[in-house]
Amino acid sequence: MKPTDLVLTGTHIRFLNRRFARTIGRGGLTVDKVEGDGATPRGTHKIVDMLYRADRMVRPSNWARAIGPHDLWSDDVSDPAYNHMVRAPHGFSHERLRRADPMYDLVFITDWNYPDATAGKGSAIFIHQWRGPGRPTAGCVAFRRDHLRWIAGRITRGSRLVIA
């Protein structure tokens, strides 16, 4: 493992020799991820993209892309664009990336089941802002806002999320 990897432990994540409190999916950890199980998949997942709300923060990194008002993420296993960013209007089930709450103000996208998605293996394992300490996600990994921002300024495309 490299210092630029986000390494999940029992109580926190290690990154650049620092420890950060984190939350994971309500379904715990799994080696057999399926859509809707709320679990966080074990494995080594590359960070492949960073999205942010330009109307709420300055660009956190030179490789971050702004989230627009029509940006969505498909979570419908019958959608040919399953587990990809799509734009509204979109006729399949999806999640809005530009949310009213701050949870997706800053998002790292991992390569979990992406870009070559297998329907039903789970969509979008993101790293994003938490709703509070100990409050689980739908399968993603989440941090306190200030910790997420600190990490965003130092993480690189290709850093990995390591979940043993």
Image: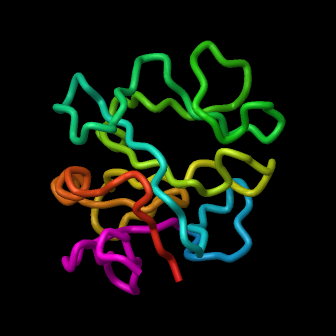
Compare residues 50 and 55 and report the one nearer the observer.
50
Residue 119 location in percent, x, y? Answer: 80, 48
- Where residue 46 appears, as percent x and y from the top left, is 50, 60
Quick check: 57 above or below 127? above
Q: Which residues are magenta?
A: 1-26
Q: Where is 82 relative to 164, above or below?
A: above
Q: How many marks?
A: 0
In terms of image quadrants, where is residue 4?
Answer: bottom left
Is residue 76 placed above or below 136 in the rendered structure? above
Residue 18 sits inside the magenta stretch: yes
Residue plotted at (21% across, 79% down): 17
Q: Is residue 123 left or right of residue 70?
A: right
Q: Does the stretch in magenta take in 24?
A: yes
Q: Please indicate whether residue 23 sits to the left or right of residue 116 in the image.
A: left
Q: Is residue 110 left or right of residue 64?
A: right
Residue at 25% in and 25% down: 54
